Image (spheres, rainbow, N blue to C red):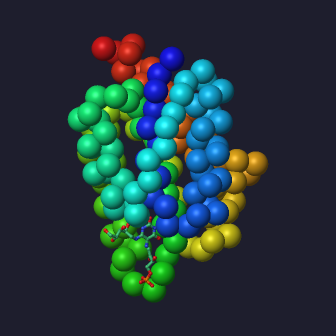
Amino acid sequence: MAHFLIVEARFYDHLNDMLIAGAQAAIEAAGHSAEVVTVPGALEVPGAIAMAADAGRYDGFVALGVVIRGETYHFEIVSNESARGIMALTMDGIAIGNGILTTENEEQAIRRADPAQLNKGGGAAEAAIAMLELRGRLG
Ligand SMILES: Nc1c(NC[C@H](O)[C@H](O)[C@H](O)CO)[nH]c(=O)[nH]c1=O
Ligand SMILES: CC(=O)[C@@H](O)COP(=O)(O)O
């Protein structure tokens, strides 16, 4: 059994709750366990994963959050830089599933967060599990 850390950027409560539910269900269905830590926004997610990876208590990570386009270039910064930070950690061999949604509006986000619809939280958890298993196989 592996132990995962779900790092959630809590920007939209109702959307995050759905993402977490999907991720937790996928981890439990695979026979693993998880705990959740909350950070202010998507830009803080890579840093939190880096801190937790250093601590060495977790086998893998699930990044969750929602970025919805506003009026300014901030959307691009938050979307691209959070993904870039997560990708950099992935390239260091850390098993991470990226479930940070980047959408044009709330309607798109609901469809993707809802476990009964596109279930992107569950998909991110499954990706983290797959990468952990791959690391075990590849050494
Ligand atoms: N606009 C969104 C943000 N912005 C906040 C940043 O992620 C960050 O917390 C802030 O700049 C302080 O460093 N975060 C989201 O997760 N979603 C957004 O839509
Ligand atoms: C991530 C965003 O685009 C949004 O939350 C920020 O909105 P704005 O660009 O209107 O300040």
Q: Nearer the viewer, residue 56 or 114?
A: 56
Q: Position of residue 110 (x, y in %)?
A: 67, 62
Q: Residue at x 59, y 64 (%)?
A: 13
Q: Nearer the viewer, residue 19 or 89?
A: 19
Residue 108 against residue 133 in the figure, above or below: below
Farthest residue, direction bottom? 71
Q: Position of residue 62 (x, y in %)?
A: 46, 41
Q: Nearer the viewer, residue 117 or 59?
A: 59
Q: Position of residue 3 (x, y in %)?
A: 46, 27
Q: Is residue 117 visible?
A: yes
Q: Residue at x 45, y 86 (%)?
A: 71
User: Which of the 4 quarters of the picture holds residue 27?
Assistant: top right
Farthest residue, direction right? 116
Left or right: 92 in relation to 34: left
Ligand 1 shows up in the quarter that is bottom left
Left or right: 137 in relation to 100: left
User: Which of the 4 quarters of the picture holds residue 5?
Assistant: top left
